[in-house]
Image (tube, rainbow, N blue to C red):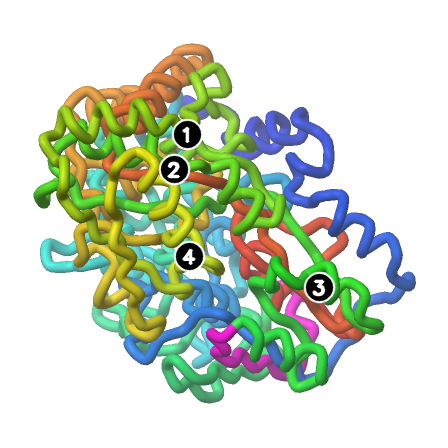
Amino acid sequence: MTSNKKLAAPLSADVSRRGFLGGTAALGITAASTSALMGRKAYAAKKGGHLRAGIGHGSTTDSLDPATWENGFSLSMDYTLFNHLGEVDHTGGVKPELAESWEASPDAKTWSFKLRKGVEFHNGKSLEAEDVIASIQYHMGEDTKSPAKSLLKQVTSIKADGKNEVVIELESGNADFPYVISDYHIAIKPSKDGKIDPTGGIGTGGYVLESYEPGVRFMANKNKNYFKSDRAHFDQVEFITIIDLAARQNALTTGEIDMMDRADLKTVHLLKRKPGINVMETVGYKHYTFPMRTDTAPFDNNELRLALKYALDREELVKKILRGHGVIGNDHPISPTNQYHADGLAQRSYDPDKAKFHFKKAGMDGTVIQLSAADAAFPGAVDAAVLYKEHAAKAGINIEVVREPNDGYWSNVWMKKGWGACYWGGRPTEDWMFTTAYAAGADWNDTFWKHDRFNELLLAARAELDSDKRRTMYYEMQEIVSNEGGVVVPMFANYVFAASDKILPSEQMAGNWELDGAKFAERWSFA
């Protein structure tokens, strides 16, 4: 690697590009959150205290195995116990975390990651290249069920260059690779004999595991040897699964918890009036979807898929489900805040006549279409499904809403039933999002969709370093997904959450995930 002529690290270029976007929305903070923060007293971060967070996710089937992480509770736990080679910041750029720096060859096929020295795992073991390699390889095995497997298929070799450097070769160039290798599943764990303990709770993160009861509660204590001296301010953090929205909100207003995710959008205006409560909102990549299994009848028929896309009044969903805290979608997963969002693509609108035309063309007249939903999928998912049913009825399409249990929804319904409700946190780059959920054979391709031209473009765009050419390819891919894909994307939702005014959040919050990029335990403090 050291003999290669190196190009400038994409980190710098990316941060500059996103910084150019300017404005609070591009930075993941809306006027609402900015106002809330400006209105607070000028507190300084205070060390200590016991943080209690009510989380609207969590299942008894969850675990500490990074290959199984699929909900917000697991994500928050991940970022509390573990670190990754890089982290996404409030600008949407990726910056080094356990890596001290990285460099690429001119064709972006060879990446060298220099590791931060002096970092220790919770068991006292020093971080070395072998730990990073074992942690990455865990997601690359033939039998792995990890969603990161599809991201890592491009890796042809991974090796150490001494104790503090890892060199990764790719089958073709990827200008976004630092984002890919920082995927939240690829948490760095200590290795022994070249293997990690996938269900172990030992990491390098700001907190040390105290106890964990899946679907119920997680507790961790401050890591006194954390390598980030300006992070992890709390003495102890506790995450409690409270799926029921009203119960979660009541727990906050009565002081049983200090903060909560997924505020109730129906009553958030009342919550804002509560003394001692700050409501915050960030704009990111999150979108709500209705994925159809394209490998299963009747959803293997694109005429039916088009019928269902035209049969939905997405404007009404944004108004009634999001209460205006978001924007309409266009049946592809690339957010308006993404660099290569296809803003010139014609917006699909509610059109019962077109829906009826495609439904008849699909030969589906008289057929009842089942749509599974639970509020575990996203807040208001059942109400959204009922609205969908009403919209479709005007096109002569009969949708039967199947109300599913919240617990076990992701294990028993998502990617199992033919058509359901779902949410995606989204990803900061087009390649990351498409590779995770739309590439043929990807473990989280929840529509089981395969499209030759799309997959050809995915590889070509990944290796293309000319921004204009990449834009052209990503625009075409969004059009293909919108017109031929198996997903209905009605809306992109803002993250809306709340905390006691005793909590001091970051002044510039990340919008890549809920609750400051799911790093609230590390970045926030008591005021």
- Disc 3 versus disc 1: nearer the observer: 1
Which numbered disc, 3 or 1, marks the residue that appears first in the sequence?
A: 3
Disc 4 secondary structure class: helix
The kind of residue tagged 4 is Ala
**Is disc 2 surrounded by few (<14), some (14 to 19) or many (20+) residues within 10 Å?**
many
Question: How far separated are the C-alphas under marks 4 and 3?
Answer: 39 Å
The kind of residue tagged 3 is Asp
Mark 2 touches mark 1? (CB < 8 Å) = yes
Q: Main secondary structure of the magenta part?
A: loop
Residue occupying the point 44% across, 42% down: 427
Q: What percent of the width, then of the height, locates residue 496?
A: 62, 56
Question: How far separated are the C-alphas under marks 4 and 1?
Answer: 19 Å
Q: In this view of the protein, which residue sits in the foreground, 303 or 40?
A: 303
Q: Quadrant of residue 157?
A: top left
Boundaries of the magenta span? 228-244
- Disc 4 versus disc 3: nearer the observer: 4
Q: Which residue is mark 2?
A: 312
Q: What percent of the width, then of the height, locates residue 107?
A: 35, 21
Q: Which residue is mark 3?
A: 230
Mark 4 touches mark 1? (CB < 8 Å) = no
Residue occupying the point 60% across, 26% down: 17
